Amino acid sequence: MALPTDQHVSSLAKQAREHFVVHVGRGLPDLVKVVSAKLSELIDMPGSAPEVQERRDAWMAFQKQQNDWLAKSRKALQRTLLPQRSAGGARNSAPGRLELLAEGAMDDQIMASRLAMKVLDLASSELNDLRLRVQHLENRQELARDDVLLPDVVTRLLVDQWLDCDMSREAWQLVQDTIADFLSRHLLTSYKKANEFLVASGVMKEINLQDMVRRKAGSGQPASPRDQAKRTDEVASGRGEQSVMGSSTRGSGGTSYNAGSRRSGAQSPANLGGTDVGVHEETRLMTSASPLARAKMRAQGVVGRLRRFLADKVGDDFEATQLLPTSPRLQQAIQRAKPVVSTSTSALGGASGSAPMVIGTQQVKQASEALRERTRDLKEAAETHSEKAIVEVVALMFQSILAEERIPPSVRVWFARLQIPVLRVALAEPEFFSALQHPARRLIDRMGACVMGFESDIASEALEAEIKRIVQVIEQYPETGRRVFQLVYDEFQKFLSTYLSEKTPAKKFVSVAQQIEQKETLSVQYTIELRKLLDDMPVRDEVRDFLFHVWVDVLAVASVKHGLKHEETQSLKQVASELLWAASAKPDRNDRARVIQQLPNVLQRMRHGMGLLGLPPSVQDGHIKRISDTLAEAFMSRTDPIPQESLDHLAERLSNLEEFLPESGVGDLDLDNDSIEMITGVDASNIEVINQGGSQPNAAMRAWAAELQIGSWFSLDHNSRLNSVQLAWRSERGQLYMFVTNSGRCYLVQATRVASYLQAGLLLPSEEETLTVRATRDAMAKLEANPERLFD
């Protein structure tokens, strides 16, 4: 269908946006309902007093403002359709101009960007199609940054209206996962509706990304197949000139760049040549998203290519596969299929009943040959092109996994046994090929990430045994599809949390790190609370300094060693209030007599507390002398004493300070090996505290650090020495990370320093792509080289 006029073309693009906005707006009342339900659920959950109060405040605020949020969000959506963009689609901001962000703007950006990435995980394929169709209609290389079709525009709109209704960021955090789940599904449907409208209007009924790959700038020659494949990935994944998120300035980490915030002297896009435009856009996207976000975009590009390839070669039959049952012959062939590796050694060349043999490359080769033979049998039994294609793609993916030499042979053959269960899921759910978050993919990727640094040591036996158990569980429940994959994925996550922190050399130091975090957190918070309590009290400087610089550490160490409510801990808390009373003015004779009577006991407990910190006697004597001199001056003072009710309030508050600890972190902790040994009494010779190196990390790097997964392997460059380390533990508050080498050497790193090392390239993931994405890429390369193999 030809598009007759430019006006008609522009009208179609406008109508597509209107369809999208209308459908998004219709879902907002349901979004309000699910948020309200979630908040109602939260206020009934147990928690500390501050938690319960925070949830109740959030619920009450939402009950009051939900209608206002709904109305403002609808109006904001409608305003996006007004003609307010400048030529070229950029915001009105002068090139080279740096602009200040309002206080809290970065936090808002992070919240919106994280929500947008959740949407992209599910809806990127439909968004890509819609983006390409609209760009085709409007003859542009990318969508405007404020185009409502981009998920980060919609999510930022919702965040802004939430805050505009005087609801807090903390309340948003309570419901952000609920909002993400709802919005991902709803925007996916909205993108589909807009695509259906454009297809019905004759706009790019079929999208072939290969036709959109440009020739190399200025060469006059077609790009090589390798370059075309790479460029197609970039088109589908949102990199370079054809960006998935338009020219999105927000990555998963939330780093924000204003449209005009280019470096001084940089050329504007209008002045750049074709190649330079690509480089400029590539660089801007590289700096606006964390490497993790970019990896997700590239991965989505790979699976997007596969989805389009299958739809192109198989046609409508592939899309309809999930609506039809598997053909009887193929079902029977799947049921008859035997594992490519048996639990007995005979299937791998060993004698039946013999002792278990060591599985090596020869057994992997035999498993690979068995997999190819089984694939031929399954394709012969398949009755449709779609079934043949799915069998072939799954087989190619598992051939790639079997060929992955960085995975130990003994684990690869167990991975190979998942081919049939995965094939069942793929036949019933073709989105397995395009959904990165499909449970089957997540399980294989998670196990693969953990065994990339596998070595033949005693500790690794438990991990290999767990992988075997998971495979056998999946094989026992062949008809449950994705549910069993989700079940065992959750079980594997739980296994990792205990295996790596309790069954490895890190076990001893995990307990140490937990105590360190607790001690440092308590020290900081005790200081904060004491400052609040003493702010309006006439406290002498010498006493104030002693409490803030010495006694808060005493209370923290005692709380860790003995417990928060232990009798000795409570006694040391009481010293603070007694010391404050003793150091205040004493015009009354009876009060002076009482000080003289109690002072020896107070000084004795002060010495005991300073002993917990390991302070030498000379240092203790110095503190005692300064406090004694201060108390002597208090006898002669004619100022008003501290009111008794203030001291009573202080004593009560001190005895229950731990109830006021924040759930979030309290900033950087003052850590070193000496403090570890002092607090815990454990030899810290085999644990190294990394507290230097790297620059101040940006928000994207902090977000990336928070998303690192337990069990993943990294390359750590510390003190000019390169180590292969595994993330074995993250503290409950997310402030401390522990990385462990295969030799048992432990590195304790604070969250900020982890982000700094990531930013400086001193901490790098061992694998840039997950196992199934790499397998998908390998499968695509073979299919593009020989498409006929799909149906052979």
Image (tube, grey):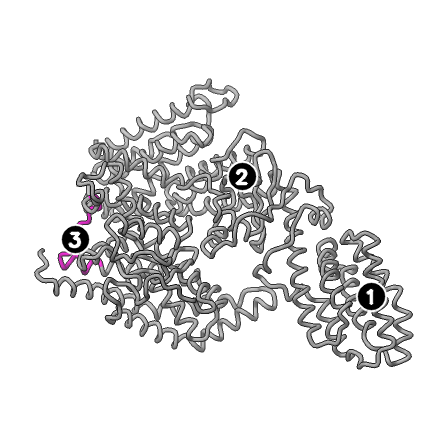
Which residue does the numbered mark 1 point to in the structure image? Answer: 627
Q: Residues within 10 Å of mark 3 (few under 14, many from 20)?
A: some
The residue nearer to you, when weighing 119 against 760, is: 760
Q: Residue furthest top?
A: 351
Q: Earlier along the polypeptide chain: callout 2 or callout 3?
A: 3
Quadrant occupied by the C terminus: top left
Q: Which residues are magenta?
A: 195-210
Cα gap from disc 2 to disc 3, whole angstroms: 49 Å
* Left or right: 707, with 201 as reference point: right
Tell whether position 725 is magenta. Answer: no
Instruction: Name the element at disc 3.
Output: loop
Query: Which numbered disc flags the more N-terminal residue, 3 or 1?
Result: 3
Residue 725's disc is: 2
Q: Secondary structure at mark 1?
A: helix
Q: Residue 206: within the magenta?
A: yes
* Amino acid, disc 3: Met
Give the residue displayed 79% in from the left and 71% down from the top: 580
- Which of the two discs, 1 and 2, labels the residue nearer the N terminus? 1
Marks 1 and 2 sit apart, C-alpha to C-alpha, by 49 Å
Q: Nearer the viewer, mark 2 or mark 3?
A: 2
* Image disc number at residue 786: none
> Looking at numbered disc 1 in the image, what kind of residue is underneath it?
Ile
Q: Hey, what amino acid is under mark 2?
A: Val
Q: Position of residue 668 (x, y in %)?
A: 60, 56
Q: Can residue 314 be seen in the rendering of this structure?
A: no
**Residue that appears at 42% across and 49% down:** 292
Task: Say which residue label 3 marks.
Answer: 204
Rendered location of residue 211, percent (x, y): 18, 45
